[in-house]
Image (cartoon, helix red, strand yellow):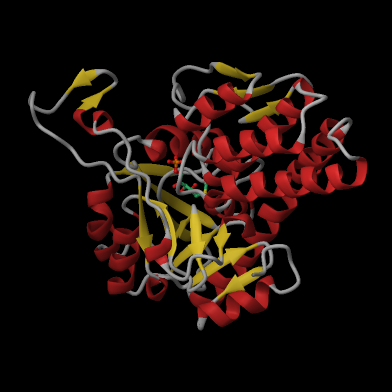
Amino acid sequence: MVEALRWNEDSLILIDQRELPLVEKYFSVKTIQDCYDAIEKMVVRGAPLIGFTALWGMVLWAKDNPTGNFEQFLEQAEYLKQSRPTAVNLEFELNRSITKAEAFTQLHGNLVGFDSELERFAKSEMDQIYSDNLSMAKMALDDLDKIVNKPTYRLMTLCNTGMLACGPMGTALGVISYAFSKGRVEHVYASETRPYLQGARLTAFELQQQDIPFEISVEGACSYLMKQGLVDAIFVGADRIAANGDSANKIGTSTLAIVAKHYGIPFYVVAPTSSFDLNANSGDDIPIEMRSEDEILSFRNQRVAPLGARAINPSFDITEHMFIEGIICEKGIIKYPMSTNMVEKLKGSCYAK
Ligand code: MRU
């Protein structure tokens, strides 16, 4: 099994997701600059893992700068926040490291020894992922059994939400793995995810490693597959969930959701609470990353569009809450009315507004 992220005491080792599945190559993060590059260039990707990578980046900085002060720490964290704009998990983990650094400085007058504290915190956060993902998966399968109730399911997903994106197990793909482990998955449609092919490269890789039966489909096939009655439910992840339930996820997600509603197929979002942004009232407040047009105009450095053609490359879109059957996080399932339900589920946690 490849490991998406490994802490090596003086560096962070990432599997280079740009090269998967054909080449297994590792990328070593030793500095804040390496960390920024790994996130921005998508060596590492997927909302939760982007957040954890940034957290480990701050641990590295604290280790390398034992006499650094809070203002310098803050400056580095703010810099890392710029590496990718949509996944709120990045901001979330960095804000938590900032809060800790501030409290440590207030108590000790400086950051001497803070590196060990932040390292312990990052490790404990990583230790928590598996149980959070497992509880989301169990809730998802229970809900599906209430709504669709079949012995086995044909499931569709988009992008990659497995261990490569989220740490052990995964979110939406974690639901699929868990359901498969219980003998409840008949087939999976993995949307290829144009233009970066996270579905065709990474989800297919993870499904294959677990022997889960699947086919890759182009996003344009989703309506056809749903109309043919081949899809019982759809599970996707999220990069940022607004207070009204609108959810940002990989470009093409909203198309799946709208078509699913048309055919009466339940569409679920599965994401940890670190993907919630209660400061965003709706999807309109969520920043959408625009990536380079080269990802569309060329494929593996081979030009495919005519010279002079331009392309537009929004990396995410917003699925409006009315198309979502439920948002599943480790604190429960959020259903209608989503805004009140969300406040209720997040009450008392550090995520509450
Ligand atoms: O551009 P990416 O590959 O980082 O986008 C990832 C996704 O959109 C995932 O579906 C999302 O982060 C949700 S959970 C991993």
Instruction: Tell me where residue 199 appears, x and y as whole percent.
Output: 40, 40
Residue 167 image point, x, y percent: 64, 40
- Residue 316 lies, with reference to residue 147, above or below; the image says above
Query: Residue placed at 44% from the left, 19% from the top?
Result: 22
Q: Is residue 238 above or below residue 333?
A: above
Vertical side of 238 occupied by 10: above or below: above
* Residue 101 position by quadrant: top right
Q: Nearer the viewer, residue 228 or 43?
A: 43
- Residue 38 makes an appearance in the image: yes
Q: Which of the two residues, 190 or 94, is positioned nearer the viewer here? A: 94
Q: The C terminus is located in which quarter?
A: bottom right
- Identify the residue shown where x is 47% and y is 43%: 160
Q: Could you tell me residue 157's position as x and y percent? A: 42, 52
Image quadrant containing the N terminus: top right
> Can residue 210 be seen in this snapshot?
no
Q: Is residue 221 left or right of residue 233?
A: left
